[in-house]
Image (tube, grey):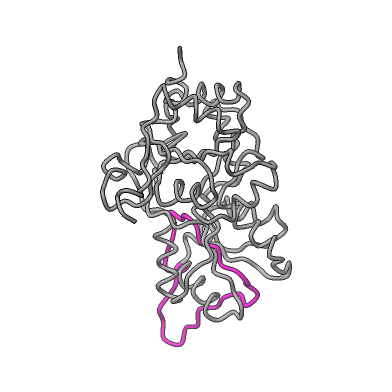
């Protein structure tokens, strides 16, 4: 693609913000780096969300962070003073459970989880039996002569997400299931390289854990989180919305903005999380959002008289 046809990102301004609002019925928001950083709410977010609701806009929160279930995310939103319902939250933990449900994963098969409680809770709500997760965080794999590492032969899927307690035991368990259990699925909640687990710096993301299992199994996963379109298919069915009347707001080019582009949404990049302005403007960057701005609250600030 030459420079003449390369898409151009527009800085959000008092002139084009009204046009964006008029052209959109629903805003899809990433959470980490957009709504909050770690446990700290980004200033002005509640007022901005209230403003959009007052304009009749549908709000949906689409996060790749699989550590929490929708119920746990709703609790976090409420603790930060933001009113949302579980139905407005689409997490990659939920997406993993729904992928299995849509594809008629057998109820008698189990799911091994390299990840947190959020995945296990969503699996249970969908009627599946999950193993592993935090419970295996303290377990160790011993290298001893004539010592066989046992794994459950009824595991039919391994789901890998963000796991701050990843260890060699989990890697071995997941690897054995994928390599030795016939037809075992390898599902990744997402492949984010890093994320804002705290408000001061980035930490390794789920992509790190997924890459470890890719390395040991020599297989590529089915990815259910952004930029995969799987979550969008669910969202469209639930809310009866049109992609062309949605805007994806996120802080990552390779997940949030690409997700929006893959599904035909408008896209708005905020520079309050992973992506910096130099990243966006770098000549090697081929993912250009429709709009960009410093933080999500600019939507509200730019509409003020």
In the image, the segment drawn in magenta is 140-169
Q: Position of residue 153 (x, y in %)?
A: 62, 78
Q: Residue furthest front?
A: 4
Name the quadrant containing residue 141: bottom left
Residue 113: horizontal and vertical position, in percent? 55, 62
Quarter of the C terminus within the rendering: top left
> Which residue lies most toward the bottom here?
146
Q: Is residue 218 above or below residue 42?
A: below
Q: Residue furthest top?
A: 305
**Residue 145 part of the magenta segment:** yes
For the point 60% across and 37% down, the residue is 74
Q: Where is residue 47 drawn, in percent x and y?
A: 51, 21
Residue 251 image offset from top left, x and y in percent: 41, 41
Dominant secondary structure, magenta: loop
97 or 264: which is nearer to us? Answer: 264
Taking the spot 53% from the left edge, 28% from the top edge, the residue there is 21
Image position of 57 with respect to 186: above or below: above
Q: Check the picture and name the quadrant holding the N terminus.
A: bottom left
Q: Residue at x 60, y 63 (%)?
A: 131
Q: Residue at x 43, y 40 (%)?
A: 290
Say if 54 sits above or below 12 in the image.
above
Looking at the picture, does residue 229 appear above or below residue 245?
Answer: below
Q: Is residue 64 left or right of residue 281?
A: right
48 horizontally vs 70: left or right: left
* Figure quadrant of residue 102: bottom right
> How many dots with numbers?
0
Q: Does the magenta segment cover residue 136?
A: no
**Which of these two is toward me, 60 or 128?**
60
In which quadrant of the rendered view does residue 214 lie?
A: bottom left
């Amino acid at each position: 693609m030459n420079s003449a046809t390369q898409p151009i990102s527009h800085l959000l301004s008092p002139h084009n913000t009204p046009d964006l609002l008029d052209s959109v019925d629903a805003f899809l928001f990433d959470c980490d780096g957009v709504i909050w950083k770690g446990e700290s709410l980004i200033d002005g977010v509640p007022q901005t969300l209230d403003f959009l609701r007052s304009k009749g806009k549908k709000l949906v929160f689409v996060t790749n962070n699989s550590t929490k279930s929708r119920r746990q995310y709703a609790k976090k939103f409420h603790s930060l003073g933001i009113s949302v319902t579980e139905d407005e939250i689409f997490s990659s933990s939920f997406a993993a459970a729904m992928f299995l449900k849509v594809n008629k994963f057998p109820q008698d098969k189990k799911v091994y989880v390299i990840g947190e409680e959020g995945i296990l809770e969503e699996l249970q709500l969908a009627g599946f039996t999950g193993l592993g997760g935090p419970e295996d965080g303290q377990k160790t794999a011993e290298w001893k002569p004539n010592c066989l590492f046992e794994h459950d032969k009824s595991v039919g899927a391994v789901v890998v997400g963000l796991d701050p307690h990843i260890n060699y035991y989990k890697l071995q368990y997941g690897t054995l299931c994928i390599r030795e259990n016939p037809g075992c699925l390898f599902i990744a909640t997402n492949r984010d390289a890093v994320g804002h687990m705290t408000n001061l710096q980035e930490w390794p993301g789920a992509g790190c854990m997924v890459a470890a299992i890719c390395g040991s199994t020599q297989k590529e996963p089915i990815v259910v989180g952004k930029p995969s379109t799987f979550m969008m298919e669910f969202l469209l069915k639930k809310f009866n919305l049109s992609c062309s009347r949605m805007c994806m707001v996120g802080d990552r080019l390779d997940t949030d903005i690409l997700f929006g582009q893959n599904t035909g949404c408008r896209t708005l990049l905020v520079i309050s999380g992973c992506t910096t302005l130099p990243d966006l403007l770098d000549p090697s960057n081929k993912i250009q959002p429709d709009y960009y701005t410093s933080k999500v609250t600019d939507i509200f600030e730019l509409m003020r008289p």
